[in-house]
Amino acid sequence: PKMAAAAAAPTPKPSGDKITVAADALFDFDKATLRPLGKAKLDEIVAMSKQIKLEVIIAVGHTDRFGSDAYNQKLSERRAASVKAYLVSKGVEANRVYTEGKGEKNPVTQPGQCPGPKSKKVIECLQPDRRVDIELIGTK
């Protein structure tokens, strides 16, 4: 009996494809409206989702450090919601897309990398923080 069990085909395990989309492609400072380049990035993700048996897409919004925690929490949620709305408009099932916002809690930039008060230069330096991390989970 043990031999027979070993011969059974292994069940495919869900493979998490974590794709991070840089939000400088997606959003301008203090905005939750997708930029054209952001839409092009999301089109790539839609194409990838069609190549696997999609379980879920998790979209997590992030902001830079300017603004209050509460404001940034809301902005990060709006950014994730924009991504979801776009993916759904391209045919991804709405109930497969989960969104959350992390506000300014998980920056990509290093502490001290973009020092100083708000200025054009500092805003540009913090651009990588304005993003939505997108994770595709499914089976090949």
Image: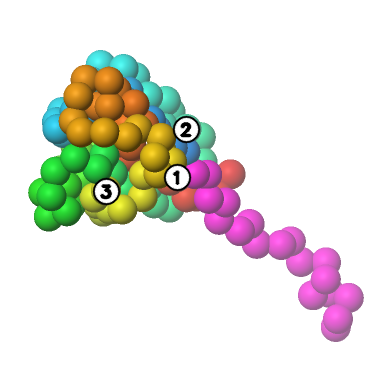
Q: Position of residue 113 (x, y in %)?
A: 41, 35
Residue placed farthest to the right in the image? 3
Q: Which residues are magenta?
A: 1-18
Q: CA distance from mark 1 to mark 2?
A: 8 Å
What is the secondary structure assignment of the residue under circle 2? helix
Q: Residue at x 27, y 48 (%)?
A: 104
Please, what is the three-letter code of the amino acid marked with disc 3?
Glu
Give me the disc on residue 104. 3
Tags 1 and 2 in contact by the CB under 8 Å rule?
Answer: yes
Please, which colouring scheme is shown? rainbow
The amino acid beneath tag 1 is Leu
Within the image, what quadrant is residue 50 found in? top left
The numbered mark at residue 48 is 2
| Side (left or right) of 42 relative to 99 | right
**Residue 128, x across and y down, in percent:** 36, 31
CA–CA distance in space, label 2 to label 3: 28 Å
Q: Which of the two residues, 107 or 76, is positioned nearer the viewer here?
A: 107
Residue that appears at 25% across and 16% down:
36
Frontmost of labels 2 and 3 is: 3
Checking the image for residue 63, the label placed there is none
- The residue lying at 31 percent from left, 48 percent from top is 60
Residue matched to label 1: 136
Q: Quadrant of the N terminus?
A: bottom right
- Asked whether residue 42 appears in the rendered view, the answer is no
Mark 2 is surrounded, within 10 Å at the Cα level, by few (under 14), some (14 to 19) or many (20 or more) other residues, namely few
For numbered disc 3, what is the local secondary structure? loop
